[in-house]
Image: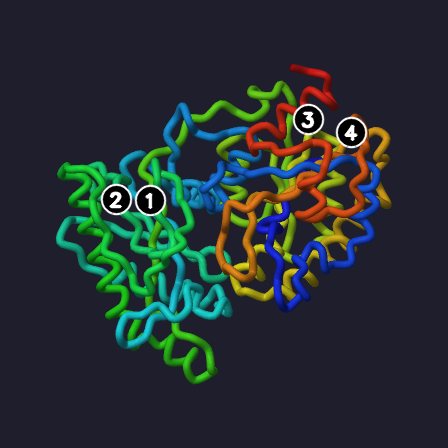
Amino acid sequence: MYVLLDGVGDLPNPSLEGLTPLEAARTPSLDQLTSNGCLGSVVSVGKGIAPQSDIAVFNMLGYDFKDVGYPGRGVVEALGMGIDFKNGDLVLRGNFATIDKQGIITDRRAGRVIEYGEALEICKTLEESLKFTRNISVTLQPSVGHRVIVKFSDPSLKLSSKVSNTDPAYDRIDGIGIARDDKSMKIQDCIPEEEGDSEAASAQVINEFGRQTVQILENHPVNHRRLDSGLKPMNAILLRDSGNYLPAIEPISTRYGLEFGSVVDMPVEVGISRILGMHFITGGDIDAYQEKASKCLEQTKKYDIVYVHIKGPDEFGHDGDAHGKKVSIEQIDDLFFGTLLKNVDVSKTMLIVSGDHSTPCIRKAHTDDPIPVLFTGAGADKDKSQRFTEKESLQGSRGSMRGIEILPFVRKTFFGRL
């Protein structure tokens, strides 16, 4: 079993008396697993790179896209949502956000309190109201919470993904989304990254979308209702991580000679599972930790390795809520890992626990800070580690690892294959 806790890594926090949420949390199940295994620390993508979850997870599964281009998070999420997409369409990940009268972004996620019906109503309005200089058709599909996917199609031109984000919190480097430290508080203009008709047209379409969206949503009935209820308006959409082609990537079963199942929730994780050819099932609500454990146990009966992605801690990191992140970790320990311990024969099963990246509460963003990685159960060495924390992981016998090294190590130590 290979469990990634989204954004679990953190830094010492004043509200927790200088501890990280992992250090402050009461985690008897993880403590038991750690005391019978060995720790190391891992940087998912690379030093100096604060990755988004998509590329971080790909790296933790052994895919760094150094030899092939990365299709972009927009494509990954679109595939995860089952959106009809063909090469030459342009698809981007969006955030419903709140801006003030001066265009300043006051909340990147419109307060997080968003009903699916509200998002769908806004998407339908935009599809019907947006007018472009080119003959463009636009599709908007709400995802979970503040997330939305936007797809542009031009019947006479293959649109280009070589354009910049309008979301000021993220840069694109070789198609990969990287969190920025110096965030502007205004929506950015989309700029072509290469010269060409396709790049210029794509940037124009995205800029027209952004400007008109703000105008259309300013007096939208959904936002009037939200304001009357004391909620933040969904009056802008921040776009990032464009993609324009379907990826052709070596299936994970071929790469490792093993069959993979997965238990995933978010569209981006579903998309990753589809791209890599994993046999996935969804794990219920984000905080349905006991259900996820039960589904993980089901998958272990069918597949050699089961990958589980648990979203919980990351959102508290983005919100700067260290106490909430601590409580989330405690719930995962009790309901997820507690359930596994009661039902798994650890003498026959290896369990790997880590994260995809750090999301420190004091930063409210992803960082490149190392994450603990635990190897426990069958085939795992035992060191002096007692707790699954950032500090202890730096002293663990596994040392420092890169994300792409995890599964090759597991294949060698547990399955005895090079």
Q: Which callout, 1 or 2, points at the residue further toward the start of the chain? A: 2
Q: Which residue is mark 3?
A: 410
Residue density around tag 3, few if under 14, some if 14–19, many if 20 or more, within 10 Å: many
123 or 392: nearer the viewer: 392
Q: Work out how far the residue at label 1 is from the one at label 3, CA to CA, in angstroms.
A: 33 Å
Q: Which callout, 1 or 3, points at the residue further toward the start of the chain? A: 1
Q: Residue at x 68, y 61 (%)?
A: 326
In terms of secondary structure, where does tag 3 sit?
Answer: helix
Q: Residue at x 56, y 20 (%)?
A: 255
Q: Which residue is mark 4?
A: 380
Q: Which residue is mark 1?
A: 242
Q: Are marks 1 and 2 in contact (CB under 8 Å)?
A: yes
Q: Are marks 2 and 4 in contact (CB under 8 Å)?
A: no
Residue density around tag 1, few if under 14, some if 14–19, many if 20 or more, within 10 Å: many
In terms of secondary structure, where does tag 1 sit?
Answer: strand
Q: Quadrant of the C terminus?
A: top right
